Image (tube, helix red, strand yellow):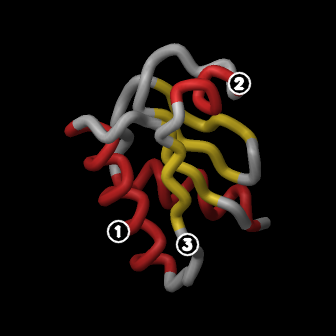
Amino acid sequence: MKIEVLGTGCKNCNALEAATSEALQQLGMDVPIDKVTDYGEIVAYGVMSTPALAIDGEIKTIGRVPSVREIAELLTGAAS
């Protein structure tokens, strides 16, 4: 599984990374989180509003910080 947080390092981008890390910990998953900060790479995903969360190359959320529970559900769905 590949998890990416797309954003330029703003407060919400950091919050999304922290929430994703918490969800991974709660699920007992040891998966690294890659940070995509290059604007060109972010746009290549079709993302125009950050932060965004991508799991296995598929954008799951854009422009908001979902709850830890929601992220855990997204991770569980992607793992099955």
- Neighbor class of circle 3 (other Cα within 10 Å; few <14, some 14-19, many 20+) is few
Contact check, label 3 and label 2, Cβ < 8 Å: no
Residue at horizontal 69%, vertical 57%? Answer: 77
The CA span between labels 1 and 3 is: 12 Å
Which residue lies under the disc numbered 1? 22
Q: Which of 49 and 79 is in front in this view?
A: 49
Q: Residue 51 carries which label?
A: none
Of the 4 image quadrants, the one containing the N terminus is: bottom right
Height in image: 23 above or below 68? below
The answer to whether the residues at label 1 and label 3 have Cβ atoms under 8 Å apart is: no
Badge 1 vs badge 2, beta-carbon distance below 8 Å: no
Residue at the image point whose x is 52% and y is 64% from the top: 33
Q: Hey, what amino acid is under mark 3?
A: Pro
Disc 2, SS: helix
| Residue 63 screen position, x and y as percent | 41, 23
31 w.r.t. 55: above or below: below
Q: Which of marks 3 and 2 is nearer the N terminus?
A: 3
Q: Residue 44 carries which label?
A: 2
SS under mark 1: helix
Can you identify the residue that label 3 sits on?
A: 32
Q: Give whichever of discs 1 and 2 has the lower sequence position.
A: 1
Residue lying at the far top in this picture: please name it.
48
Disc 1 crowd, CA 10 A, few/some/many (<14, 14-19, 20+): some
